[in-house]
Image (cartoon, helix red, strand yellow):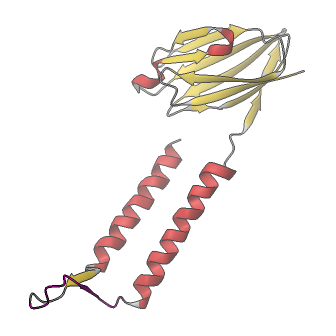
């Protein structure tokens, strides 16, 4: 998640730098003798036009990738002595955010919360009627047995961060 924050910070800084580097107003009011309040355009350098266009296209591409093509990688839970177990790190979200388990077997998800964000103080698995506090820098084990295949959501206390438990046969 830290990489995403760095990426967005870099993009924001680049946008601010381009805006400040241009140092030219997009339009200036016509002299006071003309009372129509018309604006006259100021010719911009071609390099600036190309830079702004490429920056906009890059941002559009990043948004498309983020919302349409960046899927969370699923991780299969390890089965040890009949218990499917997986460690999940809570740091700006859930990692991994997608967990694959088999139905009919006990599942133990070990949540280790590293993020002091108050939103991440709890984890909810509404389909299994589970709500647990996640103390900072401590492992909290949550156990349940999924009976039927499907996708079961788990969220933070404010429903801002989400993960999914995918139950297969």
Q: Measured along the vertical axis of the image, is residue 69 above or below residue 101?
A: below
The percent coordinates of residue 67 (x first, y second) are 61, 49
Q: Residue at x 52, y 63 (%)?
A: 59
Q: Which of 78 and 55 is in front in this view?
A: 55
Q: Which of 91 and 8 is in front in this view?
A: 8
Whether residue 24 is visible to the viewer of this picture, yes or no, is no
The region drawn magenta spans 33-44
Q: Measured along the vertical axis of the image, is residue 62 above or below residue 125?
A: below
- How many marks overall? 0
Q: Residue furthest left?
A: 33
Residue 54 is one of the magenta-drawn residues: no
With 64 as the anchor, is 159 left or right in this view?
left
The percent coordinates of residue 161 (x first, y second) are 54, 31
The percent coordinates of residue 90 (x first, y second) are 54, 27
Q: Residue at x 50, y 31 (%)?
A: 160
Q: In which quarter of the image is residue 93?
A: top right
Q: Quadrant of residue 125?
A: top right
Q: Residue at x 23, y 84 (%)?
A: 38
Residue 40 is one of the magenta-drawn residues: yes
Q: Measured along the vertical axis of the image, is residue 150 above or below residue 67?
A: above
The percent coordinates of residue 105 (x first, y second) are 83, 10
Q: Measured along the vertical axis of the image, is residue 138 above or below residue 28?
A: above
Q: In which quarter of the image is residue 81?
A: top right
Whether residue 164 is visible to the viewer of this picture, yes or no, is yes
Task: Tell me the quadrant of the picture where the C terminus can be found.
Answer: top right
Q: Main secondary structure of the magenta part?
A: loop
């Amino acid at each position: 998640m830290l990489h995403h924050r760095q990426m967005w910070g870099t993009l924001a800084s680049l946008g601010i730098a381009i805006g400040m580097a241009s140092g030219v107003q997009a339009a200036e009011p016509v002299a006071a003798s003309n009372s129509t309040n018309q604006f006259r355009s100021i010719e911009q350098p071609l390099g600036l036009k190309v830079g702004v266009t490429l920056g906009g296209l890059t941002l559009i591409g990043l948004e498309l990738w983020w919302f349409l093509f960046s899927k969370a990688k699923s991780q299969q839970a390890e089965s040890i002595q009949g218990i499917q177990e997986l460690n999940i790190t809570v740091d700006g979200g859930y990692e991994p955010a997608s967990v694959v388990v088999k139905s009919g077997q006990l599942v133990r998800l070990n949540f280790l919360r590293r993020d002091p964000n108050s939103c991440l103080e709890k984890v909810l698995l509404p389909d299994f009627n589970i709500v647990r506090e996640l103390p900072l820098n401590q492992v909290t084990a949550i156990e349940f047995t999924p009976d039927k295949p499907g996708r079961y959501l788990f969220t933070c206390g404010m429903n801002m961060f989400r993960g999914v438990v995918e139950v297969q046969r």
